[in-house]
Amino acid sequence: MRVFSWEAAAPVELVVKVGGSVLQDVEAFDAVLAALRAGAQLRRLLIVPGGGPFADAVREVDRRLGLSDSTAHWMAVLAMDQYAHLIASRLAGAALVAEPREIAAALEAGDIPVLAPSRWLRAADPLPHSWDVTSDSIAAWVAGLVGARALVLVKPPGTQPTDAAVDPYFARALPAGVTATIVSADRIDTLAGIRRPGLSGPARRP
């Protein structure tokens, strides 16, 4: 059986995690997608969705019923799939993908891959099953697996780039050699830096 190799595929240069809370401001959400569409013309990027209101529904059920850690974890990952479908339907030129081969195929076709991560995560199961692990840590893990050198975490308008803006597990999930940048959705001028070879704005490892 042929083993998949990123060296033989279209490399991902940048992973962008679009936070689910950005949906609270539809105008900001659409502006973020427009910036990503522009950025994808010059850089090979992969979009990883947050959980947003879909994951919040899981949290509410957990609060009421007391789900097991694993049940809550996989339900929240499926919430990311739902957001991926929304992003892919609203972003021109996007392709919904579920695993590495599909990411590479989308990039080769000139599409913008939007990852629905549940199938890949189920197969690998790389992270603890805990609310300390959110889509931030999942995006960091994905960035390492696809060989990206940069990860942008898009947060709601007004978010400051501090350690509190990411989940508690993030520092352990972020691979060595991957630079993480936190960008608030209202800072379109900063987010536009993805259109150039090299990120603008404050690059940091939270």
Image (cartoon, rainbow, N blue to C red):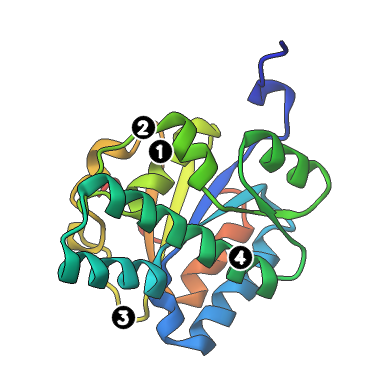
Instruction: Please state which of the two labelled residues, at mark 2 or mark 1, is closer to the viewer.
Output: 2
- Whether tag 2 and tag 4 are in contact, CB under 8 A, the answer is no
- Whether tag 2 and tag 1 are in contact, CB under 8 A, the answer is yes
Residue 90 lies, in percent from the top left, at 67, 75
Q: Is residue 186 left or right of residue 33?
A: left
Residue 199 in sight: no
The residue to which callout 1 is attached is: 141
Q: Secondary structure at mark 4?
A: helix
In the image, residue 49 above or below residue 103: below
In the image, residue 202 above or below residue 139: below
Residue 179 lies, in percent from the top left, at 39, 43
Q: Is residue 146 left or right of residue 205?
A: right
Based on the displayed image, in which of its 4 quarters is residue 129 positioned? top left
* Amino acid type of the residue tagged 4 in the rendering: His
Q: Earlier in the sequence, mark 2 or mark 4?
A: 4
Q: Earlier in the sequence, mark 4 or mark 1?
A: 4
Residue farthest toward the front in the current orientation of the protein: 65
Q: How many marks?
A: 4
Task: Name the residue at 31% across, 66% down.
Answer: 58
The residue to which callout 3 is attached is: 158
Q: Secondary structure at mark 3?
A: loop
Instruction: Please state which of the two labelled residues, at mark 4 or mark 1, is closer to the viewer.
Output: 4
Instruction: Please state which of the two labelled residues, at mark 1 or mark 3, is closer to the viewer.
Output: 1
Residue 85 is tagged as 4
* Amino acid type of the residue tagged 2 in the rendering: Pro
The residue to which callout 2 is attached is: 126
Gap in Å between the C-alphas at discs 4 and 3? 26 Å
Instruction: Please state which of the two labelled residues, at mark 2 or mark 3, is closer to the viewer.
Output: 2
